[in-house]
Image: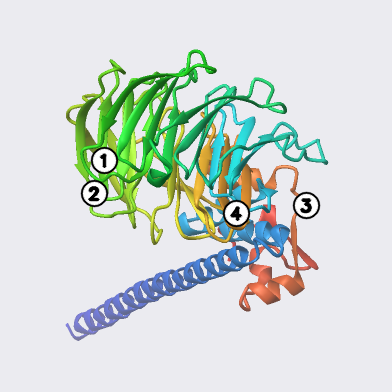
Amino acid sequence: MDDLAGARQVDARGTRWRTCAIVLAVLLVVAGVVWKRERDRGAAQERVALAHGLALHAAELRDAAPGTARDLGLAAVKVHSDGQTRAGLIDTLVGERGDELTSDASSEVALSGDGRIALTGDGDEVSVWDLTTWLDPKVVEKSDRIAALKGHKEDVGAVALSFDGRTALTGGDEGVTIVWDLTDPAKPIRMAALAGRKNAEDAGGVRAALSRDGRTAVIADDDGDVTVWDLTDRSRPVCLSVTRAPTSPVFRDLGLSADGGVAVTVDNDGAVTVWDLSDPSRPVKSADRALPAKSAEMAMSADGRAVLVGNAHRAGLWNLADRSRPVSTAVFDVPLADMYDMALTSDGKTALLAGPSDSAILWDLSAPSRPARLAALKGYAREIDSVALSADGGIALAAGPGGVSLWDLRDLAEVVADPERVACRGNTNAEIDKADWARYAGGADWSHYGGEGSDSLAVCFIGAGST
């Protein structure tokens, strides 16, 4: 019996030891898992901090060292891809597609539908540009302006261009709008003057818009009149109607649909009025919406079914399918202190917004319920007063007191979809040397990111999961 009891005690002690060993082993495994998770979490936090730091340095270097900015921005995305690093790289790549058209101050710009002919205006004249050489990367010597539109006694405050670039309007602060034939843009012909004032004492600015074919013009003047003109014979314009605005007599902005059937005006009180011009001899005020800010701007899609209206900090998209009852389809915040100008592509899916800064912001409105920022177009101007987009959004212009900037955005969709691929295309040998890594990486060990045993880090081959 004693032997049996002793055996049982030995078995019990063995069981306890085995249990303790198992528990200890489990604890060690758990501790190992916890330690690995903490280590991975720490490494992940290090990658995020490094990536955001590289992206910040890239943004700071875009003007002074664009090549370094691109490499640092790409490295940031490779180390950790998120909204912040991708947006930074996209902005850098888009910036590389920009150029200074002219350093001369300009308060107004306009583009033909294909983006080939541009108008830039300041003072009492408007410059005509053929952008063909500017849009061909193989051409080193870019052309200067090819003509100047003169004839105003006061500063030009409005420019408009037909889709084909053959008809232009320039409106001066003396209240006169001049019709130009740009069939040969290098040899513009003054066709007629549309006088919107009865006497010199009434002189004031105008806003002007043209239909797609250039046969219909709408002029809004600072006397509160909205005038519709038939320009079928540009040398003999016919006034079809003059309608008094229902609110403030001073207009901030004006838009016209491609077919000339819908016009939208914005006055200095922020009131937006939709005009039905189905019968241009009898314009009908379809609807209006009052905005809280006095500095409202607007842009309209070519079909007249969508209008974008903005003021300080905010923009809203409206559906005008039923002109008598506009429907709000989107409202989104804009990181601008004020709104100076807007432009929309023909389909209304891409918008360019500008305010008191050196950057204009591109927005994707293809899904109205989810407006998305595409890129910031940082120009050479100190402040952007006016913007323009070609019909498909492939060409953009921004003008201000510092000059006019031009962007070739024809591959924007590809840049936004895969900025890493675009940055590495034709540039797979992009490298960051040890000196720049030490300067911009905040002490991070570059051997963790593929730089071990080398004097340079191949940016396109950084592994996002490197540790």
Q: Earlier in the sequence, mark 4 or mark 3?
A: 4
Amino acid of disc 1 = Val
- How far apart in space, not on screen, are marks 4 and 3 (Cα)? 28 Å
Residue closer to the observer: 400 or 157: 157
Q: Earlier in the sequence, mark 2 or mark 3?
A: 2
- How far apart in space, not on screen, are marks 1 and 3 (Cα)? 53 Å
Q: Which residue is mark 4?
A: 379
Label 4 crowd (10 A; few <14 / some 14-19 / many >=20): many
* In this rendering, position of residue 318 left or right of residue 53: left
Amino acid of disc 2 = Leu
Residue closer to the observer: 26 or 250: 250
- Front of the two marks 4 and 3: 4
- Front of the two marks 2 and 3: 2
- At x 33%, y 29%, the residue is 263
- How far apart in space, not on screen, are marks 2 and 3 (Cα)? 52 Å
- At x 68%, y 69%, the residue is 447
- At x 47%, y 73%, the residue is 42
Mark 3: secondary structure: loop
Residue 291 image label: 2
Residue closer to the observer: 316 or 434: 316
Q: Which residue is mark 3?
A: 429
Amino acid of disc 3 = Asn
Residue 425 location, quadrant: top right
* Label 1 with label 4: CB-CB less than 8 Å: no
- At x 62%, y 64%, the residue is 58
Residue 441 location, quadrant: bottom right
Residue closer to the observer: 145 or 112: 145
Label 3 crowd (10 A; few <14 / some 14-19 / many >=20): few
* Label 1 with label 2: CB-CB less than 8 Å: yes
Q: Which residue is mark 1?
A: 272
